[in-house]
Image (cartoon, rainbow, N blue to C red):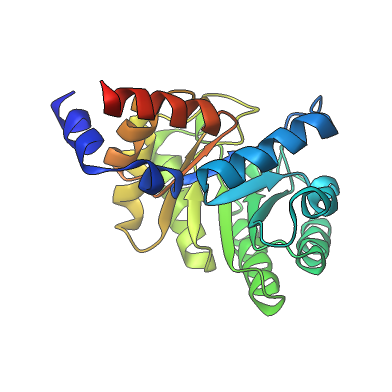
Amino acid sequence: MSRLLHLLEEIDAGKLASYIDHTLLKPQSDYKQLEKYVKDYKAYGFKALVVPLSLVPRVFEIGGRGIRVATVVGFPLGNTSTKAKLCEVAEASELGVKEVDVVMNINAFKSGDFNYVENELKAISKEARDRGVEVVKVIIETGLLSDDEKVKAARLVEASGADYVKTSTGFLGEGATVHDVRLLYTAVEGRIGVKASGGIRHALDALALIDAGATRIGTSTGDKIMEEFEKLKRG
């Protein structure tokens, strides 16, 4: 707790917001909720707004072209074909998306077909770069992996040329944990970023994950985290 209190004193609201990808991916979300998320993004200065590909044009209609939009690829199971994932990346770039969060093919990984996984991620990273997408994050779904598998997956992500290894979709298995973030951070030794995502709903949780090595936080409750954080700072 003393480490978190120190981090709480050290970091300000703008800095915390710069870690957060404010995320709206639930299938029951409607356009009115999207409008609120766009307002949240602008009010707090979050790093990116993450939405499904079909909602990207509406984000720009609501909030203008100045919004840094991220979208998901192969979401949430990761077992679509490489060709399908590349098509999603291509469309995302055409729409003006700057970041993609790609789900690793977990079926292939669990089968030990690491060449398939690495080659697919390399192809996606190259497609993204060639088309002007600036950041590629790869979701490995830590809740479905052993610790040894998490380390192996993180190193495959690094070898692929992606920018971040990401813990979870938030739709399957366990979400982000301090243990997993620290494990991934150690595995990649700071050469790429670590994005913690899945079940992060409170300011102290976000700070604990940042302390463990997370350089991005994916959450659907970015606004509530910021409100809590500001109360903690005052208190």
Q: Residue at x 78, y 61 (%)?
A: 92
Residue 200 relative to residue 72: left or right: left
Q: Residue at x 48, y 51 (%)?
A: 165
Residue 133, quarter of the rendered image: bottom right
Farthest residue, direction bottom: 130
Q: Give the image location of residue 233, x and y in percent.
A: 28, 29
Viewer-side residue, 30 vs 63: 63
Q: Give the image location of residue 175, x and y in percent.
A: 51, 27
In the rendered image, the vertical position of residue 224 relative to residue 78, given as above or below = above
Residue 18 relative to residue 58: left or right: left
Viewer-side residue, 7 vs 194: 7
Q: Give the image location of residue 163, x and y in percent.
A: 49, 62
Q: Residue at x 31, y 43 (%)?
A: 12
Q: Give the image location of residue 59, x and y in percent.
A: 77, 49
- The answer to whether residue 162 shows anywhere in this view is yes
- The answer to whether residue 110 shows anywhere in this view is no
